Image (cartoon, helix red, strand yellow):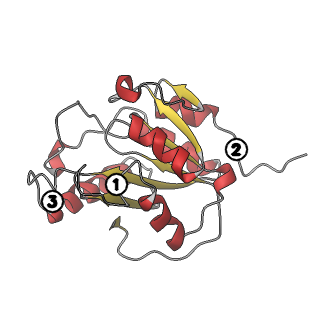
């Protein structure tokens, strides 16, 4: 389900960074949920990381599980408001993302969009194609890395949020945070020699 923007203009096929929200872009603790827009707190340097990834030629798409809706902690409207707050905070910092997709279902709902299933990436790709050979998923949890595997893209682990729960699922590489990843990732706008 797309939270933002209201409509997507179909764009050319480009490399895409599929970013988890909680634990990658904003603070997250195991067993807690962001239940109000004011509760969303970005990690330091996230805006710089997003600006750098965009400058390197990546489309930026947030893909996030939000089971707080299914669990009755927040309404669907509140989940959308929280995601709009994310977009607003990033804009104020001079950064942004191209789209935000979220799954409001619970772990036992059998939903194809709930990570680690690739439904959110598939929906994003239908609306704006992604060059999967040069795309990747960034996450802090096992479900993010499994999503990368199931979507057929590289998976990068950031050591923020709940990264210790990632377990034995291999990541292509791990990074201290999103800014460290953005600095290390290749520039896809450069011509190959």
Question: Is 67 positioned to the left or the right of 141 in the image?
Answer: left
Disc 2 crowd rating (10 Å Cα; few below 14, some 14-19, many 20+) is some
Picture quadrant of residue 172: top right
Picture quadrant of residue 83: bottom left
| Disc on the earlier residue, 3 or 2 | 3
Image x and y of residue 160, in percent? 38, 27
Residue identifier under label 2: 187
Callout 2: SS: loop
Q: Of discs 3 and 1, which sits in the foreground?
A: 1
Answer whether labels 3 and 1 touch (C-beta < 8 Å).
no
| Image mark count | 3
Residue identifier under label 1: 114
| Disc on the earlier residue, 3 or 1 | 3
Give me the disc on residue 78. 3
Answer whether labels 1 and 2 touch (C-beta < 8 Å).
no
| Disc on the earlier residue, 1 or 2 | 1
Q: Of discs 3 and 2, which sits in the foreground?
A: 3
């Amino acid at each position: 389900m797309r939270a933002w923007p209201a409509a997507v203009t179909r764009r050319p096929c480009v490399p895409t960074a599929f970013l988890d929200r909680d634990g990658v872009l904003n603070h997250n603790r195991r067993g807690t949920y962001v239940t109000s827009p004011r509760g969303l707190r970005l990690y330091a340097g996230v805006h710089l990381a997003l600006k750098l990834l965009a400058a390197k030629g990546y489309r930026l798409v947030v893909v996030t599980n939000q089971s707080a809706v299914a669990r009755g902690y927040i309404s669907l409207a509140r989940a959308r408001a929280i995601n709009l707050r994310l977009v607003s905070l990033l804009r104020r910092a001079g950064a942004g993302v191209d789209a935000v997709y979220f799954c409001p279902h619970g772990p036992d709902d059998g939903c194809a969009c709930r990570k680690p299933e690739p439904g959110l990436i598939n929906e994003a790709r239908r609306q704006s194609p992604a060059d999967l050979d040069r795309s990747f998923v960034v996450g802090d949890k096992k479900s993010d890395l499994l999503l990368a595997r199931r979507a057929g893209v590289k998976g990068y682990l950031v050591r923020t949020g709940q990264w210790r729960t990632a377990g034995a699922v291999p990541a292509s590489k791990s990074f201290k945070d999103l800014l460290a990843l953005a600095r290390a990732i290749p520039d896809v706008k450069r011509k190959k020699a």
